[in-house]
Amino acid sequence: MAKVSLKDLSDKLGVSMSTVSKALRDSYEISEETKKRVLQVASEMGYSASPYAGHLRHHKSRTIAIIVPELNNNFFIQAISGAEAVARTKDYHVLVYVTHENNELEEGILKHLQNGRVDGVIMSVAATSKNVQHIEALMQCDIPVVFFDRICHEIETAKITTDDFASSLTATEHLIKNGCRDIAFLSLSENLSIDNKRKQGYLEALHKHNLTINEARIIKCNGDDKVNFRKIKQLLNTNKPDGIFAAVEKLALTTYEVCHELKIDIPAGVKIICFSNLTTAPLLNPSLTTISQPALEMGKQAATILLKHLEKKRATIANENIVIKSMLVERASTKAVAVV
Amino acid sequence: MAKVSLKDLSDKLGVSMSTVSKALRDSYEISEETKKRVLQVASEMGYSASPYAGHLRHHKSRTIAIIVPELNNNFFIQAISGAEAVARTKDYHVLVYVTHENNELEEGILKHLQNGRVDGVIMSVAATSKNVQHIEALMQCDIPVVFFDRICHEIETAKITTDDFASSLTATEHLIKNGCRDIAFLSLSENLSIDNKRKQGYLEALHKHNLTINEARIIKCNGDDKVNFRKIKQLLNTNKPDGIFAAVEKLALTTYEVCHELKIDIPAGVKIICFSNLTTAPLLNPSLTTISQPALEMGKQAATILLKHLEKKRATIANENIVIKSMLVERASTKAVAVV
């Protein structure tokens, strides 16, 4: 027998999924008449056979999901650790889901979570995500969502970010202060809130210091590692900039690999800075100047807000932008080099 | 109402949890009489109210758990990716749990999984784990477990490891070949199968090459990062060895930090090698010689065996040791240096 979902009941009854869900949980918001009708149809369609229906009605799972675009990135690992630490003190479990920057996978995961396997979700969206229907659908099942880092502006909920614009302005000014006049920006995806903010900060710094803005210096590195390697190699081979600001860590590491291959000295030939929480940043050759994000703190904040909401059982999470500052950590990759 | 567990039913009925579980799933292995008795007691005790009882009886969750000791380690990230890739092709979900090397947390997670939230488990045990009762209890609930990397020899199931002994022999011989005569071994935990095998390989190489075995050269780095830093600093400050073989990546990185602080040149002052899947190994200062483990492949194998078992619904997974070879990747940190 195929599993009967909330969506099936909602379609059959002609009411919203939220109404179905609330009716099944005997919410005071739903009329007795509607509850009766929902329960009858649920019974007829065999909804009680659904694996998690029981716990939707009887009690909560005391589990939250954290959905991240990749695991091979210290920022997300630290954010997960922060969320986990908070959850543990409240006796909640944390499940980790990875979208691999794939929107379809993200949609599949959120659909899977509709049946009440978790009480709430903390997420950072995939770089390919353009629409938000799958997130809205989950929230309509009364499963609250809190965003961190990569947020959806259009959805009303709590959003934890770092000061991407201001930090990018600082990062670009740091390169300018140390002698760069022709700075390239390595972008991950135009669909990402953080990528846009970081690009804006970069452009603002160029404008502030009367440097020419050249669209050709904004490199879209949204492919796989090999494609990105080729694009960055082309950039450094043809008309080398004197500074590179990478929106994300992995693009800075690829730039290092290209420089090693082309035997370009960092920082004499090109200076490099990026957003990163890489633990080996001080051990790289040369050590990498980073904008270090408060990843642990961001994960903690997201979990704190979500769990506070779940414990209080309030109807909604307030739409709120919480910004936690990043920090510039100067290392060798951006050092000013004496003119010989 | 407190949740009634399989354990409660088992205690009340005086039969094993496995029998209770099989009876509830109408297994042919259980007599009709026993089934009737189990169902009656389950009904009396309100077992059907259990959130996951429904799906234990009716259908599978199509979800497996992967339990790892830490996330901040590329080996585990790659193993998770491998398991995930296989699971996805079979339409299974993967939940990631982290024990933070804490045995109590590991026990809590396995207890939580007894109620059938997942169909099977892939795990690498925590460094503090000494006993295996919690793993046996999970398997008695008919939730199969497959081990990878850090295994429990005493449990009958599939165990995926790399050739820890042979690779450690190779790693140590590589140091000897490049001039080392006084090699220290950095150990993570005496309770770990891999740590013991790696130490044995190290000792074997010393023996083979007629080098003195000195127990004081085996450093137990089972504390937090600061404690390990202090121990390694003491080792390098007092009676410096000419080579270091770190059982795990994080101990090699701490050694790098100590060398940077003490201004000890790598490889002239000390050569360093370790088991590692660090993506930044080639970019470190100097680039780090590693024994690279087939992490992705190990995760894939573990998932393949587990899912094959789940699909076939066989009673047990064969006790099998599957060994996938690691590879020595020579880089600058172990280079032979010309005598001046």
Image (tube, coloured by chain):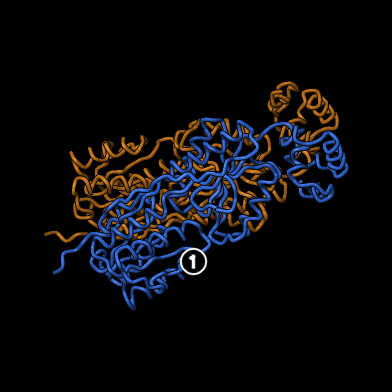
Chain colours: A blue, B orange
Q: Relative to residue B146, is residue A300 drawn left or right?
A: left
> Residue A290 in the image: x percent, y percent?
33, 54
Left or right: residue A251 versus residue A114 is: left
Disc 1 crowd rating (10 Å Cα; few below 14, some 14-19, many 20+) is some
Name the residue nearer the viewer: A21 or B79.
A21
Residue B314 makes an appearance in the image: yes
Return the residue found at the far bottom.
A238
Q: Position of residue B154 (x, y in %)?
A: 54, 36
Q: Is residue B315 above or below residue B50?
A: below
Per the image, label 1 sits on a secondary structure element best described as: loop
Which image quarter: residue B32?
Answer: top right
State the residue at coordinates (33%, 67%).
A183
**Relative image position of residue B187 (x, y in whole percent):** 35, 40
Instruction: From the viewer's side, name the closer residue of A325 and A278.
Output: A325
Q: How many marks?
A: 1
Q: Specify the amino acid type for callout 1.
A: Asn
Give residue B179's position: percent from left, percent from top: 22, 55
Q: Residue drawn 56% across and 44% down?
A: A319
Which one is in front, B102 or A173?
A173
Give the quarter of the figure containing the C terminus of chain A.
bottom left
Camera-nearest residue between B325 and B20: B20
Camera sees residue B172: no
Q: Chain of mark 1?
A: A
- Disc 1: which residue: A222
The residue at the far left in this view is: B340
Whether residue B72 is situated above or below residue A33 in the rendered picture? below
Q: Is residue B147 left or right of residue B309?
A: left
Picture quadrant where residue B192 is located? top left
